[in-house]
Image: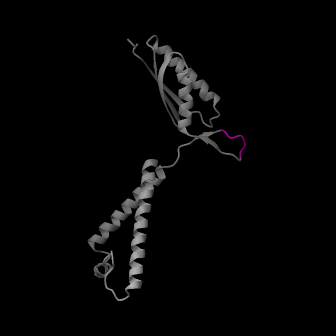
């Protein structure tokens, strides 16, 4: 959602800037040519005549208003869902708020898990509520690999000053021996 918001913000800004440039051009043209009945870029007189005959209950007005309302609600939803998902940490004083990103937590867990000799590769995803570890090990004993990875992950999470302990899910699989 943050990527969508970061894309929409410049596009909406450019659209508003374009409307502002058009407005400036038309105002300057109206000052320079006070008796003209047409605009330079935008046909204001034709639009004014059309809008004079249009009422609020006409079908095009209702369709445009519903479309604008739906687009506004979608933009509001995108903005609300694009918030940061920080992982809160215990603060040293009540006046402080300390947090970290889920990416940092995932990197810490990943480095700790990969430091084990029996782990060949690992991927970690983390949030404030859950840490998911997917580890690959050598085909000796997959059960002991899962226990080792879970123990290392639990020890690290217990050592971190997290305000709320996330649940840990560990999945392992054996990696094929190189030929």
Q: Is residue 8 above or below residue 160?
A: below
| Residue 158, percent from left and from top | 62, 28
Q: Residue at x 42, y 62 (%)?
A: 14
Q: Residue furthest bottom?
A: 35
**Residue farthest right in this picture:** 93
Q: Residue at x 41, y 61 (%)?
A: 72
Above or below: residue 97 compared with residue 171: below
Residue 128 is drawn in which quadrant? top right
In this rendering, the answer to whether 57 lies above or below 102 is below
Residue at the image point whose x is 42% and y is 60% from the top: 12
Q: Main secondary structure of the magenta part?
A: loop
Q: In terms of depth relative to the viewer, which is nearer, 173 or 14? A: 14
Q: Is residue 8 above or below residue 159?
A: below
Residue 129's spot in the image, x, y percent?
Answer: 53, 36
Closest to the observer, 5 or 159: 5
Q: Is residue 135 left or right of residue 40?
A: right
- Say which of 158 and 178 sits in front: 178
Does the segment drawn in magenta span residue 119?
no
- Regarding residue 128, the answer to whether it shows in the image is no
Q: Which quarter of the rendered picture does the C terminus lie within?
A: top left
Residue 44: give x, y in percent of width and height.
33, 79
Q: Find residue 90 and report its horizontal and vertical position in percent.
A: 66, 38
Identify the residue at image location x=48%, y=49%: 82
Residues shaded magenta: 90-94
Asked if residue 107 can be seen in this view, the reply is yes
10 displayed left or right of 165? left
């Amino acid at each position: 959602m943050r990527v969508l918001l970061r894309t929409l913000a410049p596009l909406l800004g450019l659209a508003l800037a374009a409307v502002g440039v058009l407005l400036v051009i038309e105002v300057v043209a109206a000052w320079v040519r006070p008796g003209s009945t047409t605009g330079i870029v935008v046909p204001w007189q034709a639009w004014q005549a059309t809008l004079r005959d249009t009422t609020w209950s006409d079908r095009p007005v209702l369709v445009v208003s519903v479309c604008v309302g739906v687009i506004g609600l979608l933009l509001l939803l995108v903005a609300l869902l694009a918030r940061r998902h920080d992982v809160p940490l215990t603060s040293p004083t009540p006046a402080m708020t300390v947090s970290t990103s889920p990416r940092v937590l995932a990197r810490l867990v990943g480095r700790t898990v990969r430091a084990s000799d029996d782990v060949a590769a690992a991927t970690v995803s983390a949030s404030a509520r859950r840490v998911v570890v997917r580890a690959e090990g050598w085909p000796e004993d997959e059960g002991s690999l899962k226990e080792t990875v879970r123990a290392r992950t639990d020890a690290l999470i217990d050592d971190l000053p997290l305000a709320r302990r996330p649940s840990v899910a560990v999945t392992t699989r054996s990696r094929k021996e190189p030929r």
